[in-house]
Each structure stands twice: as structure tokens, then as C-alpha cells.
Amino acid sequence: MLSGLINTSDSLERQNEKLRKVVTTLMRRVEQDTDSSGAAYAQFQRAVMLEDEVRARTRDLERALDLLNDSNAKLAIANQETEAARADLANAIETVQEGFALFNADEVMVMCNSRFGMHMGDIREQLKPGMRFREYVRIVSRSRFLSLPPSETPEQWESRRMERHKDSSVIFNVRLTGKRWIQVSEHRTPSGGTVILQTDVTDIVRLERQERERLIDDQARLIRATLEHLKQGVCIFDSFGRLVGWNHRVPELLSVQVKRFHLGSTFAAMSTHIRTAYTLSDGITLDQIIAWADGRIDRAPLSFEMQRGMDMVLAVFMQEMPDKGFVISFTDITAERMAIRAMTETKESLEHRVFERTLELEDALSEAERANASKSRFVAAASHDLLQPLSAAKLYLASLENECQAELEPRRMLQKASSALQSVENILGALLDISKLDSGLANTHISTVDLGTLLRQLEVETRPQAAAKGLDFRVVHTHARVSTDATYLQRILQNLISNAVRYTAQGKVLVGLRHLPGKVRVEVWDTGPGIPEDEQDTIFGEFQRLNATASAADGMGLGLAIVDRACALLQHPLHLRSEVGRGTVFSVELPRAKTQPIPVHSPVFRSSQALNDFTNLAVLLVENDDELRNALTITMEQWGVDVLTCKSCQEALDLLAEIEMTPDIIVADYQLDDGLDGLDAIRRLRGVCGNIPACIISANRSTELVQDCARASLPLIYKPIEPAHLRDFLRRPRSIPIDAPRRA
């Protein structure tokens, strides 16, 4: 009943005070009530009961107060422990190497350590507990230490960062100025809060980038190697139309200078070259191709053909890549299109095909002449300047040999000197051959060659050398005829046979043939020391000799180099088999001839003197080199010849006019100083003296000079001059050649 008068939310003291007032009031009313019905007594009983209840309530309140005091004491202890734990937590996160921050479920920062935001010094002081998460993102996006891409604004970065904040777990890298990187890890707590860790990953990113660059380089090298092995020309453009990769076939197929292909070149540069040099087929225009490359039209795979003149047809295929770049491939289909054209254009005239081929050969020849102009000038200078004094020296020695026939020791020394000069001549001849073959200016005259006659001639030349060494030297005779250049074939077989004899100390040297379908293989066997396998490729280089201790008289290691280049020039396969200690086999495959050999006839002369009679023989010598002219004069005078010497054609004409005498023979150097060559000089002198016998002497071994001399029916004697060759010419019957053609 009293519970309605007492507010339970009041304190115990207030509740006790109210109860005392109630008891006092009730007691007073009981004392004043004199009702005889006993109501006062009842009121008294209720008051006593109420007092007992108040005492019980008071005891309960006292116990509750004691419990509350005890709880307050425990709460104080708990608060102390919480503050200690908070301090320990703060100390713990302070020791963390990363930046740390904790936001509660209301997106308010609760705590952070001193490393949080340390990479952004301009906003570090603003990062404090109580800051809201959005404000934290906003000031970070405006920090001058944040490195944004040129295409991104701080507002865009802020918006993108808040979108990522919606995820329960986020890890991403942030690029800072100074080429530094931090990794931001953001995770949700069970209570809905957010934990952020900031880790400096600059070193890791740099290592990853270095490794990525290395992998990219390796991949680029692999792609480059793959591209270089393709027969097609391939070039790759990025999404901006810039050239980022190509192989060597592209400039070859497009006939574009290599320097015009470099990283960053645009497709427009290539299209300009295509516009000027090529015509397009398949109904496509260059403007459509450019629009495709620029992405202005649909980039479906594009294929077409383009043609340069009549000698090049390329199939072009263009395809887009996933990164919006594109690849272009060029395939040479000239052969296929030429085959189709040959079948469809049967009315094409032979003159037209010859004309096209001539243009191609002229272009190739012009290119070769430009590439080897310097080398050709050296060859020409060497052939004249080196062989000229060598001719004089050989003639002087020949003259001395004639005067020292009775003296053994001087004759022996002269023979050694002649041998040394012969070695020099051989070396110079080999060097000149090498230079001519390397320059690409070597001309060939393919004809039918009687192989048996050539081998018999080489046998006669080589047998004395083989006999001097005690070798069993044999040449298998044959009637085979082959199609080749006679001069180069003679040089090839001569070098192979002489090498076999030179390097075989004892045993045998055999020259034989094997008949194969459509061809003949000439084999040179020897029982020499053999060639190790690791040296079989190097011996075909210049100045490579099997015997390093051999003297210069045994050659300078040019013979096999000439053989290799001459076989390549003539397209005659050259093979080598060798076994150390047992011997070596060189073989050359020659195509069989389909026609009979053309006989070579010498000019027919009407005889007027005996072959060996030089009596009253007058020779007009036109030579601009003083030493060689003097040596030739001494040599011929020892034979009993009357020599009239002149430096030039004009001097010879003046001399003949002065002495009023006609010589029997004219010997003229091809290269003179007065602007005329030897052929012109002989033609002018014959205009005065009549069509008397004449010959040309020269160090020029070009095919053109040989042909000019043949057309003029003039013998050609090469420098250095062999006295025997000159003597043989003088021994010929000295009369007018029958039907001798005149040089135009």
C-alpha cells in the first residue's frame, strides 16, 4: 500500500525520510481516533506492521548500498585496467613499423600512431582522433605529395577511393612524389569499424618493376628472334599508330632504307612510301587503309595486294590487337603471281623479258659497282703498279741468265731469284683474283670445255713437281665435256692439284672422275696429313695454310679461297672429305655439256722467215714505263732483235717518220700516258706502216680487254711478262693475218 507513496528512483535516504513521515502521521491519527468500534486498534496494528516492513526495507536498502559501493570499487579498478590496456594498445601500435589508424562504426577516427600519414608532411598534423573518414580521404586527395596521373583530378581520386571503401577488405598501392610507393590495407572490424595500415613498399615496387622490365626485355628478345626467323615482313604498331617492332624483312620487301624504320615512326610515313612506290589491288585505296589504321572505320581483318612495277608483288594482311594496336604482315608472292602471269600472258615477247632482265642486271651491277668502287680502283692500281716493275725484274733476270750460262754459282743464284719472283707473281695473281671475285666484278664465259684436254695440260704442268717429291701422281683420262668457264675451271683444278702435291710428303696423288646423272664430279685424292674436322671450314679463308711452317714460296694460303669463291661464282658444288693421317679428297661437281666444244683457231699467217730466225727483225716497242721498256729492250736485243723504243704513240709516229723505216712487229703497252690505249696506238701505227703483226702487253686481266684484243686479232701478253711467251710471239711467221677484223 505504501509502495505507491514512495518513488523507487529516489535515493535510500529520501525513501527512509518519507517512510518516517508516513509512520508519524499514522501514529498521530491512531492516538486521536477514539472510535469505540476498535478501528484505532486496527490502525495501530497496521502501523506496527508498516514499521516492520520499513525496517526490512531499510535493511535491504543498506545491503544494496553495500553492493553498490562494492561495485563502484570494482568499476574503478576496471577503469584503471581499461586505461592501462588503452595505454598498452597505444604503445603497441606505436611500435608498429606501418602507419596505423582505427575508425569506429560511425566513421570517426579513434586512434592512430605517429607513422600514419608520415609520407605526406603537409597533412600529417591534421590526422588526429575525432576526424571523420571522408575528411581524411579528402585531405589526402589534395596533398601535394600524392602523385596523380595527368588524366586524373583530386576529386576523381577521392570519389574512386570512397567507392573502394565500401568493400570489406581493400589493398592497393598509392604513388607518391619522389618515385615512392605506399601500400594501403583497409579491413573491417567485427563491430563495424575500419582499420587502415600504411606500408612503405618503394623497394618492393622497384624490384618488381626491374623484374618486370627484365621479363619484358626477355619477351621482347624472344619476339624479336621469332620475327627475324619469319619469311614474311612483320611490323607492329601501338594504339597511337606508332611503330614499336619490326623484322629485317620489312625494309627488304618494301625497298625502304633501314634508317627510316625506328621506334615511334608513324604509319603515315609508311603510307607515303606505299603511295609513291606501289599500286594497290583488290579495289582498295590507300585512304581506306589509312582510315583503318587510324580507327576511323571498323577494324575487321584487312587483306590486299600491292605491286611495285613488274618485279614485286606483296600480299598484305592487317589485323587489330587487343590493346587497339595492329599488326601488318608482308608476304612476297612475286613467284606465285609471276607463275600465274606466265601461264596467262603467253603472248609476252622474248624481247620484253630480255629487257626486264637487263634492267635487273644493270641495277645489280650498278649496286655492285658502287659498293666495290674503292676495291676496284685498288685492283686496277695494283695490277699496273705492282706487275709493271715485276715484269722488268723478270726480264732483267732472264737477260742475266743468258750471260751467265757458263758460271754455275751465279746461274744458281739467278734461278733462286727467278723462283722468288715467280712466287711473288703467283701471290699477286692470287690476290688480284680474290679481289675480283670478292668485288662481284668477275665475269664468266660459259662454254663447252673438253675436260680431258684440260686435265692432260694440268698433268704436264704438275708432274715435274710431283716427281721431284717422289710421289705416285696419276690423272685418269676422260673424254667428258662440261659446261663451265674454262679459265676459272683451270684455276680451280690447278689449285686443288698443286695443293695436293704440295702437302703430300709421300704416297699418291690421284685425279679422277665420277660420272653422275647429268654431271661429272672431278675428285683430287691425296695421302697427305689430312685436315682436322675443326679446321675444315677455316681453310677456305684467305691466308689459311695447312702447314703453318711452310715458306712463302709454297703459297700464302690463297689457293683454296680462290677455289671456294670461283666455285660459288660458277655454282659448282665443292665438297671436302678428310681423315687425319690418311689423306684428303676435294671434289667439284660440273654440269655435262650439251654441245660440242668450240675449237679455238689461231690467226693464219703467210710465212716469210724461219721460226727461230730473229735476223734483221725490227720491233717497235711502245711502253711508257722506263724500267720495263729498258728491260724489254735488253731482253730482245740479246735475242738479236733490233728494238725501236718509244714512250708514246706520237713519239713512235715521229720516230718512224724520221728514220723512214717500217718495223716488222709492234709491241705496245695497253695503258699509255698520252690519252690513248695500246689498241688505238696500234691502229694509228698500222695506218702508217700497214697491217703489220702486233701484240698488246698489259697487267689488265679484264674480260673486256680480252674481247677487244680478240676482235682486233691482237695477241695479249700479261704482265709480268714471261720471256718465253714474248719469244714465242716473235717466232710466229711475220706477215699480215688473213681476214683480220678491224676494231671499231
Image (cartoon, rainbow, N blue to C red):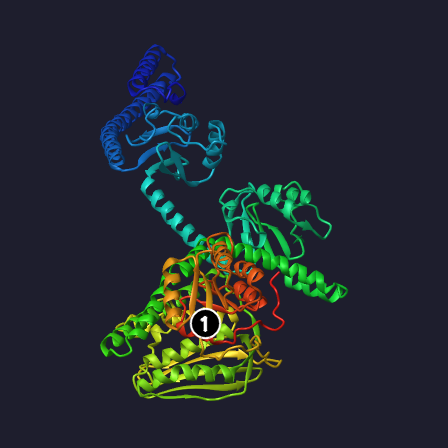
Judging depth in this view, the residue of 2 and 184 nearest the camera is 184
Q: Is residue 333 visible?
A: no
Q: Does 249 sit left or right of 106 as displayed?
A: right
Q: Does 499 sit left or right of 413 as displayed?
A: right
Q: Which residue is mark 1?
A: 616
Is the residue 18 above or below the residue 175 in the image? above
Q: Quadrant of residue 59?
A: top left
Q: Position of residue 731 (x, y in %)?
A: 47, 76
Q: Residue at x 35, y 68 (%)?
A: 394
User: Mark 1 falls on what kind of element?
Assistant: loop
Is the residue 276 above or below the residue 250 in the image? above
Q: Is residue 608 visible?
A: yes
Quadrant assignment for the C terminus? bottom right
Q: Residue furthest top?
A: 32
Judging depth in this view, the residue of 412 and 90 nearest the camera is 412
Q: Residue at x 28, y 24 (%)?
A: 58
Quadrant assignment for the N terminus? top left
Q: Position of residue 698 (x, y in %)?
A: 46, 63
Q: Does 199 sit left or right of 263 as displayed?
A: left
Q: Residue furthest right?
A: 347
